[in-house]
Structures are given as structure tokens and as C-alpha cells.
Amino acid sequence: MLASFDSHLFWAALSSGPYWRGALLALELTAASLAAAIIIGFFVALGNFSQRRWVRAVAWTYNWLFRATPTLLQLFIIWYALPQLWPAFSGSWFTPFMAAWIALSLNEGAYMSEIIRAGLLSVDPGQELAGRALGMKRRQILRRVVVPQAVRIAIPPTGNEFITLLKLTSLAYIISLHEILTSAQELAVVKFQYPEPLLAALLYYLAIVSVLMILQSRLERRFTWTSGRGRRRPVQAPAVPAVAHDAR
Amino acid sequence: MSVLRGHDLVKYYGDLEVLRGVTFEVEPGQVKVIVGPSGSGKSTLLRLLATLEAPDRGTVTLEDLPPGPGEVGMVFQRFNLFNNMSALDNVMCGLVEVRRLPKAEAREQAMAFLGRVGLADHATKFPDELSGGQQQRVAIARALVMKPKAMLFDEPTSALDVELVREVLDVMEALAREGMTMVVVSHELRFANHVATSVLMMDEGRIIEEAAPGEFFSSPREERTQRFLALVE
């Protein structure tokens, strides 16, 4: 059955420089995009609650624009169309990595804003009222009370977003960013042999996601408030809900 | 000489006039208990006195000035503790964030107030790990630590299991004996009888009757009050 499986080629692929570098690049792009998306998403989420109608309109339009259009199209627009529209984007600084980072951050920001919004809404408003009764300012209540609890709610879906983003980085292969899939594709074409390079790529994704899942469960524990935390009593973190993700 | 005073308070929620020109005042060391059917405006009155909401008309003053941050303490029906903080951090929070005290000093004061409500042993516990009665006592300590000039209680025992009501009322009675100025919305008639300087009846956004507890419960003047008391007892 597996007569044509070349384990030597498989191990060579798995340990090759381009794979490592590709994986590192994918990881960097994912982390940088998610970080930017969390910042964007936080302000867009707050924008949703704004008293001012135009702020809410901007937040809504942003979410609508980036969720209603394919990520690949957004990537193409930023990489190919933007430099033609705006010469500042044709400089040498505008690398495929930059283009992918901008596209994925903007795209993911829309999804993160929904997650953060749900997190903020999950904190019972009575706590805000109590904070105001103590004389705390809105910003103090947000920072000390609401955000920490919203973070707890947002961790599991954010973990899912990390995974989604990691997989989305493979799109950047189309704008010639050397991530894992590019390495696999190149190796396969050169050797005219597909199973080994692709299986090796698969293992890279699995490894990255596995590490992420461990980090996530640690983070969840850190944001669970029982006195057991200090005494390192194991705390049962709620299971990550299986979210059916919309295709992007 | 009143400490806390609400003058001619009117409040609308949409088209609904929840308060229809209420004037209310409490003098130093007095305990006023407010009773009345739901929707009569009791909680709204407390929220205005605590400056959690602004009146549509009228003014709230504390010693003739608008109340400053934390000067009017408020205790809620559902405790509203900060769930991400231990009991101690809940009590410290206002001192650190609002009064800008150094942490060590805030901690010391907070511990003293947790002790006063009998919870010094539970300082490191989180709200999830406390009973309702304990949570409410932490909430009382959290308000008291700010050294308020008046304390407002919005149905402080009505979310509690019966056997936990006593411990909260005990803390409140002790507070009243120490001379704290208090406004309490509650249907704990025994508490009102024991502790209140006067009892007020609210109905449809107005205070319709105010009397010393003995008189209020034995011979209420208003027919509406008589009907209400018959239902509560």
C-alpha cells in the first residue's frame, strides 16, 4: 500500500531548514496578527458600546467589511492593489510578510472584536454599578474589574482564532511568503513526490497547535479566581467549546 | 440638620414617572427603613441618593454639597462583589483606586473592616467560595471602608437563604448602634421595628407615610399602608 512512501525523504523534509523557517514564519505571522487583532478588536468592541452614533457606525462597518469578504481577496487587495492606489505601499518595506500581517490583522480584528464584545457583555453589570458606588471611574472599573473577567471568557474562542489564523497563514503562500506550505510545495515539485513533504507539513501544524493548547489551558487556569490558585490546587478549567468556524 | 438629603426628586424611565417629586432626608445617626410594593420607586430613590443615576429634576446633597466619590456607601441586593478579586481585594479596591492609599495601608484597613463583619478568616477567598451571607458582609465592609457619611442598603437580605439573613442583619444592627446614618430598603419588619428611627411607605413614586416604627406598624394612617402591611406579614 505504502510502497512509494520514502521515509528518508519524509525525515529529510521534517528536519529541513525551509520547513523550520517556514514554521517559524507562520508562527510569527500568526502571533503578530493575533496581537494586532486583539488591540484592534478591543477598540472596535468598545466602539460598539459608544454613546456616539458615528463611532458605532464605524465599528459596525469595519466588522461588516472584513467578515463579509473572503480573506484571500483582502490579501490580494492589500498586496497587489494597495501599492497601485497608494505609492507609499510600493516601497521596499512593504514585504509579503508586511502585507500578510496587515491583511490578517485587519481581518482577524473583526472576529476578535466580536469575541471581546461577548466577553465584556458577559460581566454582570451589577459589578460596574458597585464600582461606581465606590467612586471608581469608568476606566478604573474597566481595567480592574471588567477586562480581567472578559479575558477569561475570551480565552477559549481566542485559542480557536489562533488556530484559524495559523491555517490562514498558508494563504500567504500565494503572495510568495515562504511559510510551511510553500516549503512543502517546493519540495514536492522538485522530488515529484507528494506524500512525504505534505505529511511533514501536516505534522508541523499539529505540533504548533498542540503547544498552543497547552499554553491555553495554563492561561485559563491563571484567569480562574479561586483561592486554590495560590496553593496550586488543580482547578478544573471549563472545556473549550467546539466552535464551528465559518470558512474564510 | 440633615446629612443626606434628596430634594423634590423626579425620575423618568422613558415615559414612566418612577419618582414624582420625592423629598427625603436623613439626620446623623438615623436609620430610615423604606417599604413599599415593587415599582413604587424605592430602589430608584436609593440609586439617586447614591448618585448612581442623575435625577430628571431635583437635587441630592450630602451636608449641603453634592456627594463626593465613595461618600455615600451602597449595598446591593445581589452583593455585586468583584468576582475576580478575593474578599480582601474587594474591600481594598476602593481605597487603592479611589482614595489612592498605598497598598500596605489599604490592606491593613481592609483587614480591620473584614474583621468587623466577622470575616477576617475568609480574606483570601473569592466570591465564588463564599456563602451569600458572607458575600453580603464583604460587600458591607467594602462600602464601610470608604468611611461613608451614610450607608444605603437596597434589599440587602432578599437574595439570601433564610438561614443566612440573620448574620447580615446582625452586622447592620451593630452598625446602626455605632451611630451610622442608614437608609434601608427592606421588608424585614423585625429589623425595622428594632432598629429604625422611622419607617417610610412608598407607593407610585411618592412617600405616602412616615412614622416611628411602633406607630407605623400598629396604627398606620394610610389605607394603602394598611393593605401593604397586611400582605407582608
Image (cartoon, coloured by chain):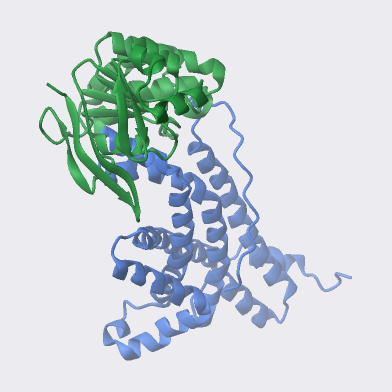
Chain colours: A blue, B green
The residue at the point 61 percent across, 72 percent down is A247
Residue A197 located left or right of residue B222: right
Please identify the quadrant where the N terminus of chain B is shown. top left
- How many numbered badges does the structure rendering display? 0
Residue B131 located left or right of residue B102: right
Q: Nearer the viewer, residue A160 or A113?
A: A113
The residue at the point 59 percent across, 39 percent down is A237
Q: Nearer the viewer, residue B158 or B188?
A: B188
Query: Could you say where residue A243 lies in the image, as x and y percent from the top left?
Result: 63, 58
Task: Classify B180 as above or below B59.
Answer: above
Picture quarter containing residue B161?
A: top right
Picture quarter containing residue A95?
A: bottom left
Query: Could you say where residue A6 lies in the image, as x and y percent from the top left?
Result: 77, 69
Task: Classify A70 as above or below B201.
Answer: below
Q: Is residue A152 visible?
A: yes
Q: Nearer the viewer, residue A6 or B172?
A: B172
Q: Which residue is at the far right? A: A1
Q: Is residue A231 visible?
A: no
Picture quarter containing residue B118?
A: top left
The residue at the point 58 percent across, 45 percent down is A214
Query: Could you say where residue A179 lies in the image, as x and y percent from the top left?
Result: 53, 71
Task: Classify B154 as above or below A212.
Answer: above
Q: Nearer the viewer, residue B146 or A102?
A: B146
Query: Could you say where residue A23 lies in the image, as x and y percent from the top left?
Result: 54, 64
The residue at the point 44 percent across, 56 percent down is A117
Q: Which residue is at the far bottom? A: A84
Residue B57 located left or right of residue A200: left
